[in-house]
Amino acid sequence: MGRLTGGDPSLLRRINSAVVLHELRAADCATLTEITRATGLSRPTVEGVVEDLIGAGLVVEKAAEEGAARRQGRPARRFRFRAEAGHLLGLEIGAHRVAALLSDLDGRVLGAQATEVDESAPADERLERLRTAVAELLRRAGVPRGSLRAVGVGTPGIVEADGTVRLGTALPEWTGLRLGERLGRSFRCPVLVENDANAAAVAEHWKGAAVGSDDVVFVLAGLSPGAGSLIGGRLHRGYGGAAGEIGALHLLGRGVTPETLLSTTGEPLHPLDEQAVTQVFAQAREGDRRAGAAVERFLQRLVHDVAALVLALDPELVVVGGWAAGLDGVLDPLRRELARYCLRPPRVALSMLGEAAVATGALRLALDHVEEQLFAVEGTVTGRSPAGARLSPKGL
């Protein structure tokens, strides 16, 4: 980047600070000369910015290696980004469990904690289980709560920009829940709430099966499938956050519910839970004719729902995750039906992150927020941050 002159001096300082910090974060460590060469800034400017970043706690001088001075004379001072200057949480709130991931400011995972929860648990109990899991994770990692800089959350349902669950039928007492506000009482940092399938799509693009693919559909395959989509590498939420709710397609003249699809008796399957569905799939593998027909109906609905989304978005890749991804026979019929219905069938792959996908995506959303804070020229954040969530480098 060339040297910038003129204009608002404070704006130039912020630009220079973001440029230097970005270079140091990308490198393991660097000398002043190396930073100067990489950024195109003057040596005095780089020296001043580095000293400011040291004062802000974001950069530290790296100790010289033992014996380096004797071999080469006095070594050049080297500096590194302090990833330990803050921490991030990625949280998953699901029907059967809550989970938390803890990382540093580089996104390096430092610990994980998961706790089972009954699917009928009310909202207060589910949130209390989550708080307990977070407290235990922070205790084991030796990280004070005040070190947290952002918290990402993945949850079922249609989520408003302020973290309110506008519609959430998968969890009791979830529709209308001000989830961002409730969790915000437990943390002194921004809390960003996202739909679970959207979070999982972000995770697979970051560390999973969709690395290197920017047009992706992630299918969270369960009793009522949902999907998250990336278009041009960016999460597509839709106007009201409801993009990808393919589980609602049966309301559009296809009045077949999972309870009916997976029934082996002619009566709706009850209780409708993962254990009951897994049993139906096991019976089908053993040759039970009724179970085999039920599984075929379930898979046909899944592939038809996914095909509708593929036709609309024309993705390069479809990633299948969720508990149904672990059941036999998902990928082959999905590939076959997509080839039948779609003008250009996408590649199809299983999730590489499995049950960790939602929490990992929530962690990435928290990291995105902090990166915007670190490198935003104006010191403000766009996107889905809650009101009052501004941070400056000194705040980090």
Image: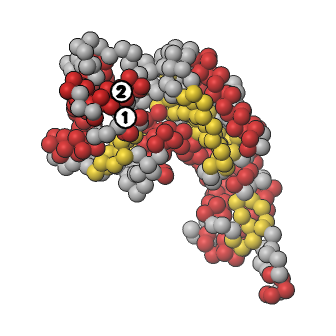
Left/right of residue 291 with respect to residue 70 in the rendered view: left
Q: Nearer the viewer, residue 255 or 177?
A: 255
Amino acid, disc 1: Ala
Residue 275 position by quadrant: top left
Left/right of residue 95 with respect to residue 13 in the rendered view: left
Q: Nearer the viewer, mark 1 or mark 2?
A: 2
Amino acid, disc 2: Gln
Q: Are marks 1 and 2 in contact (CB under 8 Å)?
A: no
Asked which secondary structure carries label 1, the reply is helix
Left/right of residue 17 with respect to residue 344 in the rendered view: right
Residue 263 position by quadrant: top left
**Residue at the location (63% across, 41% down)?**
112
Residue 121 x %, y %: 55, 16
**Residue at the location (41% across, 22% down)?**
273
Asked which secondary structure carries label 2, the reply is helix
Seen in the picture, residue 153 relative to 370 is either above or below; the reply is above
Report how many numbered discs are placed on residues in the image. Answer: 2
Seen in the picture, residue 177 relative to 22 is either above or below; the reply is above
Instruction: Categorize mark 2 by other alpha carbons within 10 Å: few (<14), some (14-19), many (20+).
Output: few
- Quarter holding the N terminus? bottom right
Instruction: Categorize mark 1 by other alpha carbons within 10 Å: few (<14), some (14-19), many (20+).
Output: some
User: Of the numbered discs in the image, which one, if any, rests on residue 279?
Assistant: 2
Seen in the picture, residue 55 relative to 322 is either above or below; the reply is below
**Residue at the location (23% across, 32% down)?**
287
Residue 201 x %, y %: 43, 42
Q: Nearer the viewer, residue 28 or 285?
A: 285
Residue underneath mark 1: 324
